[in-house]
């Protein structure tokens, strides 16, 4: 179908009518229109939201909720098309100087590198080392580290500026850690003085970062030497500008006590997934598994439970690409099985779907993922036993193409 207008004729129409005309266009023709002049470029940008709503069945209530989130709807459209229509590519690496097999470590991206911190091989063999992976040279470097080096696993790490803030972790014997900071530029560990009331030291919790604030949630703690195993359900915030801990007042239905969960931040929202309740004695098993999803609005400090459901519950390997949170592996929510599924949560329309990919790596949990450029690098973890494999997923955003069923608009 071909529709021809002259610029002058179209631009003489009221803007509401122009928008109504543009609302019938597909992605390719919307881009063509936006390139014709500044006025139509501005009006075309308004239409991407409606195009996304139609293409991906986003209901009006969700669209209203997203009004203040400053979403680039055009960008979202093509990333969503990539994930829906492309087969994501797994790649295997054989880096130089690869660290020994481990699990329950952490990783953070920094420039073109990824910093890996500690981890464990067994319940009592925990590491106190840092390895830096250069993604361009495909080599691991072990820096000379200054300061008192902690020996822990099952901690959390976030990077803010040029520092890695770790919290929690256990040495496998008797020591639980709280806050420790690794300065990337000086390769030095330190234990800063803090204000406020610090959280209880813990393991198997989760952490994420928004701006200059680190958020931690849940986990478990056992007072040594013979205390009772305790699962936690608290949220704490560290402002690294003032080095102050707070436990904010929060409204809404909270996720409650849980361990082995994960959470990621996008914009000013924090999304928390899965986890469960573990009972070490006398059963040594999960007594509850969760496949739920919660979102915390950090501007209102309000929790909301979403309708989406996970197929995995504990220790999934997660990472974010644009408005999408991906999960690889983890323990099944319905059995004791270790999985190798690849799923993604769409933070715009609040749905969870399986992503298409080529031959997947072996089932895995307790590993890490960090995103550099258009690749998510997954390293180590447990596949029945600790491993030191390195794989990546590559993402290339879709570009518009002309199809036979598209309308062709000429100005």
Image (cartoon, rainbow, N blue to C red):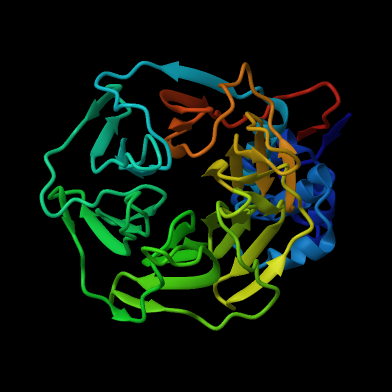
Q: How many marks?
A: 0
Q: Residue at x 37, y 71 (%)?
A: 238
Q: Position of residue 67 (x, y in %)?
A: 68, 66
Instruction: Determine whether, in the image, residue 330 is placed left or right of residue 139.
Output: right
Q: Residue at x 79, y 44 (%)?
A: 56
Most foreground residue, 374 or 377: 377
Q: Position of residue 85 (x, y in %)?
A: 72, 27
Is the residue 132 above or below the residue 228 in the image?
above
Rendering quarter of residue 227: bottom left
Q: Position of residue 297 (x, y in %)?
A: 60, 70
Q: Is residue 9 visible?
A: no
Most foreground residue, 3 or 115: 115
Most foreground residue, 300 or 313: 313
Quadrant assignment for the N terminus: top right
Q: Is residue 386 visible?
A: yes
Q: Residue at x 67, y 37 (%)?
A: 343
User: Which residue is at the far right?
Assistant: 1
Rendering quarter of residue 373: top left
Is the residue 259 above or below the residue 313 in the image?
below
Q: Residue at x 47, y 28 (%)?
A: 385
Most foreground residue, 49 or 121: 121
Quadrant assignment for the C terminus: top right
Q: Position of residue 16 (x, y in %)?
A: 81, 62
């Amino acid at each position: 179908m071909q529709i021809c207008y002259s610029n002058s004729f179209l631009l003489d129409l009221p803007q509401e009518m122009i928008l109504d005309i543009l609302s019938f266009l597909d992605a390719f023709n919307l881009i063509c229109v936006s390139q014709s002049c500044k006025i139509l470029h501005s009006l075309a940008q308004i239409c991407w939201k409606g195009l996304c709503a139609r293409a991906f069945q986003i209901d009006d209530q969700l669209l209203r909720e997203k009004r203040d989130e400053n979403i680039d709807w055009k960008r979202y459209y093509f990333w969503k098309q990539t994930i829906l229509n492309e087969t994501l590519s797994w790649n295997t690496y054989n880096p130089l100087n690869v660290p020994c097999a481990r699990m329950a470590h952490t990783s953070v991206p920094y420039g073109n590198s990824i910093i890996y911190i500690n981890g464990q091989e067994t319940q009592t063999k925990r590491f106190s080392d840092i390895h830096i992976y250069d993604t361009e040279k495909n080599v691991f470097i072990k820096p000379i580290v200054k300061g008192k080096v902690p020996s822990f696993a099952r901690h959390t790490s976030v990077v803010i500026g040029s520092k890695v803030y770790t919290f929690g972790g256990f040495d496998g014997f008797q020591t639980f850690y709280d806050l420790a900071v690794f300065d990337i530029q000086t390769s030095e560990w330190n234990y800063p003085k803090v204000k406020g009331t610090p959280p209880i030291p813990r393991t198997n919790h989760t952490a994420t970062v928004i701006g200059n604030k680190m958020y931690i949630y849940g986990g478990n703690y056992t007072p040594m030497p013979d205390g009772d195993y305790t699962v936690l359900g608290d949220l704490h915030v560290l402002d690294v500008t003032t080095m102050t801990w707070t436990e904010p007042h929060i409204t809404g239905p909270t996720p409650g006590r849980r361990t082995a969960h994960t959470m990621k931040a996008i914009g000013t929202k924090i999304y928390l997934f899965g986890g469960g309740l573990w009972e070490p004695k006398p059963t040594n098993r999960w007594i509850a598994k969760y496949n739920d999803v919660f979102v915390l609005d950090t501007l209102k400090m309000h929790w909301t439970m979403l309708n989406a459901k996970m197929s995995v519950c504990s220790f999934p390997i997660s990472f974010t690409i644009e408005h999408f949170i991906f999960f690889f592996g983890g323990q099944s929510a319905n059995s004791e099985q270790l999985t190798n599924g690849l799923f993604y949560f769409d933070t715009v329309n609040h749905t969870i779907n399986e992503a298409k990919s080529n031959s997947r790596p072996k089932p895995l949990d307790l590993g890490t993922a960090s995103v550099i450029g258009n690749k998510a690098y997954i390293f180590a973890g447990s596949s029945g036993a600790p491993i030191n494999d390195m794989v990546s997923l590559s993402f290339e955003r879709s570009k518009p193409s002309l199809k036979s069923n598209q309308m062709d608009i000429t100005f």
